[in-house]
Every structure is written in C-alpha cells, then in structure tokens.
Image (cartoon, grey):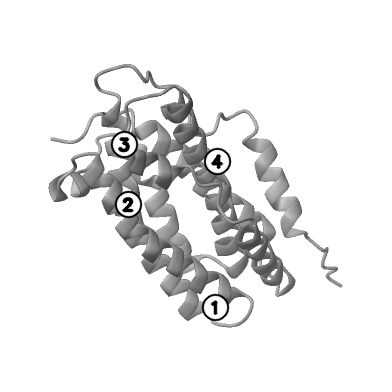
Amino acid sequence: MNVRTHTDAKALADELRQRLAGEAPGSPLVLAPVTSPDVLEPLRRLVAIEYQAHEVELVTYGTLLARFPHRPAAELWVTLIRIVHEATPKLRKVARALSMSETDLAGRVTDSGAYSFHATMSWIASSGSQSTAALAAHTDMQVYYSGATAVARRLRETGASVPGEFLEYYDDPGDDALKELALTVSQDGLDRGDDPQEALFHAQRVADGLLDLWKATMANPAA
C-alpha cells in the first residue's frame, strides 16, 4: 500500500531560501560602481531584459489560468496578470527617463543567461504542475523584489546620478499577501498530488534565472 506523506509548501520555500542565503540580492549589479560615467548602462540592460520578460509572463499566467482555472489558483494568475499589465507602462516611463528608444527596449543582451528566466517560465506555462507554477511565482517575487530593492536603495543611498523614475519603480518590496497566496496555491497543488520535488526543482530554475538576469546586466548589448 502506498502511503502519501504530507509536504508543506512553506517548507519547500524555506529550503529554497536557505539555498540562496549566500547570494547577495541583486548581485553583481548591486555592487557596480555608482560614480562611473557608464553607471546607467547596466540599468538600461535591466530595463530591456525585464520589458521583454513582461510579454513572457503575461503569456505564462494566461496559460496557467486556462490550465488551472479553479480557486485559489485562478486568483493568483489573474492578480499576477494585472500586476504585469500595469507595470509595463510604468517600465516604459523608466525607459524614457533613461533615454531609451524602442530599439533599445527590443535590444538583446549577449550574455547567454539573460533569458534563462524567460525560458523557464515558458516551460512552466505549458508543462508545470499547479504547485510548480505557484512555487515558481513565489520564488520570482522573493528573488526579484529583494534584488530590485537592493539595487535601487544602494543607488539612492550613494546619491548616484540616476533618474527618479528608476528608483521609484525598482524600490518596491512587493506584496507579502500575494506571496502567501502563491504558497496557498502551491499547497493546494501538493494536496492534489503534485510532485514536491518537481516544484522545488523548477523554483530553483526560476531563482537561477533571476540571478543570471542580474549578472547579465553587466554584460555588453548585442550588436
């Protein structure tokens, strides 16, 4: 007789958090020189990579809504769609403040890790379980917001010559209630029989993709 063991989504999130404990949020961008004449170039790369990720995220959450339309999962996907949709014009405002053109926003970064987050989210959209997708969303919020706020606050505290629009957009700790909802949805998936190790594996891929994203901001744009 098979005996199912209970797995707690919060425990999975805690395990992943411990794995990432040695990673400085937003590193190496958060450690970049703030007095260099080129201080804005990594920020422009960050904006371009994130802008391109928004379309991927909208498709991902829309697909997940179609695959898992029940509660509480549907509330999570709909909320994430709204957040990304509302963030896009704000990010375009940041781009304008950084003197970025439409070509700049569409520009590719040469670093091969720049788009691993995009690829992981695309796989999760089509093939990930509910628990996998929700734990990935929780991980995304944890890693993205901690890195973004670390970068913005260092720039603010050092008096770097950076547009206020950038600081306002990225100095955002995220929504703790939404993170909790993501764990609730992940737990619901686990209770329905989803594989916890699959969820943890792909959440780690999301974390790695975001860490690669921060590193890619220090790379050179593609020709």
Q: Is residue 11 left or right of residue 22?
A: right
Image depth: mark 1 or mark 3 in front: 3
Image depth: mark 3 or mark 2 in front: 3
How far is disc 1 from disc 4 in space, using C-alphas?
28 Å
In the rendering, at what x and y percent does residue 34 appear?
37, 20
As helix, strand or loop, the secondary structure at mark 3 comes to loop
As rendered, which of 99 and 62 lies closer to the eye?
Answer: 99
Q: Residues within 10 Å of mark 2 (few under 14, many from 20)?
A: many
As helix, strand or loop, the secondary structure at mark 1 comes to loop
As helix, strand or loop, the secondary structure at mark 4 comes to helix
Mark sitting earlier along the chain (3/2): 2
Q: Residue at (37%, 68%) from the top-left corner?
A: 59
As helix, strand or loop, the secondary structure at mark 2 comes to helix
As rendered, which of 146 and 49 lies closer to the eye?
Answer: 146
Label 2 sits on residue: 91
Label 3 sits on residue: 163
Q: Which image quadrant for residue 100?
A: top left
Q: Is residue 70 above or below residue 180?
A: below
Residue type at mark 2 is: Leu
Q: Residue at (44%, 69%) from the top-left corner?
A: 82
Q: Residue furthest bottom?
A: 70
In the rendering, at what x and y percent does residue 212 appear?
42, 37
Residue type at mark 3 is: Pro
Labelled disc at residue 68: 1
Check if mark 4's residue and mark 2's residue have beta carbons within 8 Å.
no
Mark sitting earlier along the chain (1/3): 1
Residue type at mark 1 is: Phe
Label 4 sits on residue: 146
